[in-house]
Image: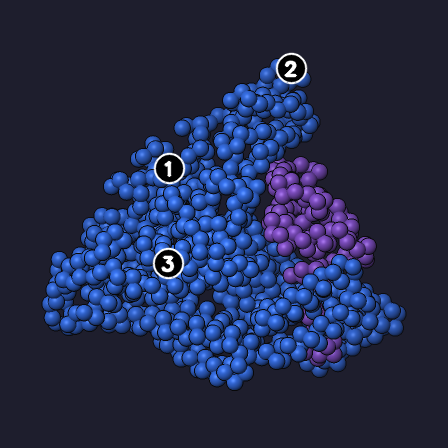
Chain colours: A purple, B blue
Amino acid sequence: MSAFGSALDENPFYVLGLSPDASRIELEREAQKLLGMLELGFAGATTYATPLGPRTRTPELVRAAVAALRDPYRRLVAELWARHAPPATLESTPTAAPAEATQPGLRRRLGWSP
Amino acid sequence: MADTPLYVGIDLGTTNSAAAVFDGERVSVIRNTQGATVTPSVVRIDKQGRITVGTRARRFLEQDTPNTAAEFKRLMGTGKAIEFPAAGVAKKPEELSAEVLKALKQDITDQLGVTVERAVISVPALFELPQSAATSEAARLAGFSRVELLQEPIASALAAGWRADDDGGGTWLVFDLGGGTFDASLLETRDGLLRVVGHDGDNFLGGRDFDWAITEHLAAQLPVVPRRNTPEHGPALRALRLAAEEAKIELSRGERAQVTLAQPLSLEGEEIDVDLEVTRATVESLCAPLVDRAIEVCLRLLSAHGLGPGRLAKIVLVGGPTVMPLVRQRVAARLEAPVAEGHDPMTLVAQGAALYAATASLDGRAASVAVPAGRQVWLQYPAVSADLTPHVVGKFVGDHPPATLRLVRSDGGWSSPEVSIAPDGTFLTTVTLLPRRACTFQLEARATSGELVAVTPASLTIVQGLTIGDPPLSRTLGVALASNHVQVYLERGAPLPARRTFTHHTVETVAKGSSESVLKIPIVQGEMTRADLCRLVGTLDIGGDAVKDTVPTGSAVEVTIELDRGGRLSARALIPSIGQVFEHVAHLLVPDAAPAALDAALGELRRQLMDLRSDAFRHGLSQVIERLDRVEARLAEAERDIDAAHGGDADAAQRARRALLDVDATMAEADLARKWPELEDQARQTAISASSMVGMYGTEAEGALLQEVLAAMEKARRDKDAAELERQLRLAQRLSSAAFNRTSEAWELYFEDAASEISRTRDLPRAHALVTEGKSALERGDTEELRRVVKALWQLLPEDSEARKKGFDSGVR
């Protein structure tokens, strides 16, 4: 799983449609509302906006988002990404990190010992 | 009671079980037919096949040992049947657990006159998936139509925190010493929300260790000393152990206890009368090292979160063994925090499970077949809410819904404004709750004409109180790859239910029609990056005889792993090239633990331990030496269990198997620490390389994150924490890669590297063709195409066969 590939697409604040200043109770309230709306098939609840364009919202994403934001450290990271959103890029799908996918020879050449 | 939901919680314990119900206002512990709040998890089957459960069965543990089973929870998920020779039947552990559940279910009906079929059942925090699956199966066999599983520490935390007046709360600790496991959970309550800050535990420490310590002390005083590795001594040891347990309980109050057995013990042809005295001081000196071991776990947990003794607001004690004054005194003294009063350590878990059932909207009552009166509406709202103004979302079924809706609180103190109902029947509103109360709201729907419209359900109830989020996954779950690495699907702590899909590629061909050709997708659980150090919990097998067409090497396989709220696993593999889906997860059993295999594993681990120890001394790595000391103590315990396994104790065999796996993982970490100088050097190089990559190609956010990672690396380096340093190092590499991958140079370099390795590929013609395509893309400057080619080339490179064997023969990368 690429922690950074999903930092924007699945940023908890975008998933919940809230600003990084939202209070803890606002996050919980919004998540509960969205889960209910998704369960009942509210049309407006199924997509959310990101700097990379609209993405599909699922109950799993909402649960993961609210769980992430309950953890102070993970919230801080999510805030950081949400506040410093990079410009949109052509990269629309996350790529595998070469640290996992490439061969040892290459890793050595990149300065990473095998 | 009929209109009020009834939430049911069950603590299905190793030694004792309990049930509790919550009606939205009050939690009540259920009493069994003997009037007790706990029911021993003991089942007896007599020669007529009659089943007895609880206290009545427990009485036969000594008199009719072969036909009376206890502690079968430890064998859940192993598939091992327990024989009842008198009746000539064998029952699986889940079938025996089902008998306990049936008894508790009946007690609820007897006490409340309500039939229940939905409940929350607690399980140990570190239960493996097969054990959880067996628990769900036990519930099904007991007639429950739906259950959710909840980790025991969360249950006790919820119960302990439910009526907490101090919402400012601070951090507190749940010290849960059960029959066979110890769990320590660090919690925080804020804004009515309970958060598990951290968790640690010892899966091999519990009240039974106390009992064994006392048993061994008693046994040593007999003229013939019964031994655990001698099957013939089993009945004598069991009798002594029961007496030891009773003496321990008696000594919670008195200073001395007499251990007298009604029947003489038969040992080596001798009849031995047992009449011994044991004092509280003796029992405390025998148990103190075990209590200290639990306290060490707590200190480790506190330290992992930057806390020391004296920083806790309170400690909540859970589990039978914590009734011992020794535990209470020692824990309070060493952790320098007060022990919370007013909680029943024996039923707290069941109470928490009942509260959680409310959080999960799991009304326990059997569904009545009611004919809907009026317009039907589907409602979504939290059954328990920390928020005083939660949302209510709804949708009317069918065309032409009513025009407006109002919610009226039944105490008459509040009603919502009228909300419009959309043409598709949907609406959204909020309600206002009373603090710490269950509030019922009537639904008042009106047609456009203003006439009242009858709706079903006519009301909804929300309890205001402490809530906890979705249950977190206790161990990281992933797929073992052919490289013996793990592709993590769901991280530890991920909220359940959860589902995740990744695309893998096959590393060998699955030939259509060949029964020998099987693609294995092993599903593993654990925190290690090496697959062989994690536990195999299931395998998706795709056989040649099941595929519609041959699946060549490098084919894509989309694997989806799903866990429901109760932690039940399902997995699915889709092979797009042949449009086929495979869903059957095989071998969902805890592996068998044969004593001979355990002996061999123990021997091997001892050899490794010696090597690691001498290396650690040579390099002066004090932290590693400390860790290896712990390993040595664990190995000594495992050895005792293996001894008992030779004597036919299947439970001890399982304990030993888990202990050896844990030791193996600890040694892998220690081994990592041994390579400290190399690791440190690698960290330095990575820091330079990542700073340069992120500096040149990274975004502002990546730059900020890298600074955090580098700081964490520096801290890990100072602390000489090898595992943490390696983890941070991987994060830095990923950040660096993410930045570097944006450049065209990255893909040129990858291409050059992959092209130089094509002699190793299995499909040389295809590799050559790809290299030609890549060269052409390179000339055109088509980075997108070059990327596709590089990825295709990577798929053709073979995996190391040794690594693949270790990775449970995984057929995917």
Residue with the mark numbered 3: B330
Query: Would residue B553 appear left or right of B672 to someone viewing this image?
Result: right
Q: Where residue B642 sits: x, y (%)? A: 34, 72
| Camera-nearest label, 1 or 3 | 3
B75 or B360: which is nearer to us?
B360
Q: Chain of mark 3?
A: B
Q: Is residue B535 above or below residue B140?
A: below
Q: CA distance from mark 1 to mark 3?
A: 31 Å
Tag 2 subunit: B
Instruction: Tell me, yes or no, if residue B686 can be seen here.
Output: yes
Mark sitting earlier along the chain (1/2): 1
Element type where label 3 sits in the image: helix
* Quadrant placement of the C terminus of chain B: bottom right
Q: Position of residue B210 (x, y in %)?
A: 31, 61
Of the numbered discs 1 and 3, the one sitting upstream in the chain is 1
**B129 and B23: which one is in front?**
B23
Residue that appears at 65% across and 22% down: B418
Instruction: Say few, some or many: other residues with alpha carbon within 10 Å of mark 2 (under 14 / 14 to 19 / 20 or more).
Output: few
Residue B28's disc is 1
Q: Residue at x 87, y 69 (%)?
A: B781
Q: Spatial distance from mark 1 to mark 2, Cα to Cα?
A: 44 Å
Three-letter residue code for mark 3: Arg
State the residue in front, B527 or B490.
Answer: B527
Of B762 and B60, which appears nearest the observer?
A: B60
Asked whether disc 3 touches disc 2, contact meaning CB atoms under 8 Å apart, the reply is no
- Quarter of the image containing the N terminus of chain B? top left
Mark closer to the chain start, 3 or 2: 3
Identify the residue under disc 2.
B450
Tag 1: amino acid:
Ser
Element on which disc 2 rests: loop
Q: Secondary structure at mark 1?
A: strand
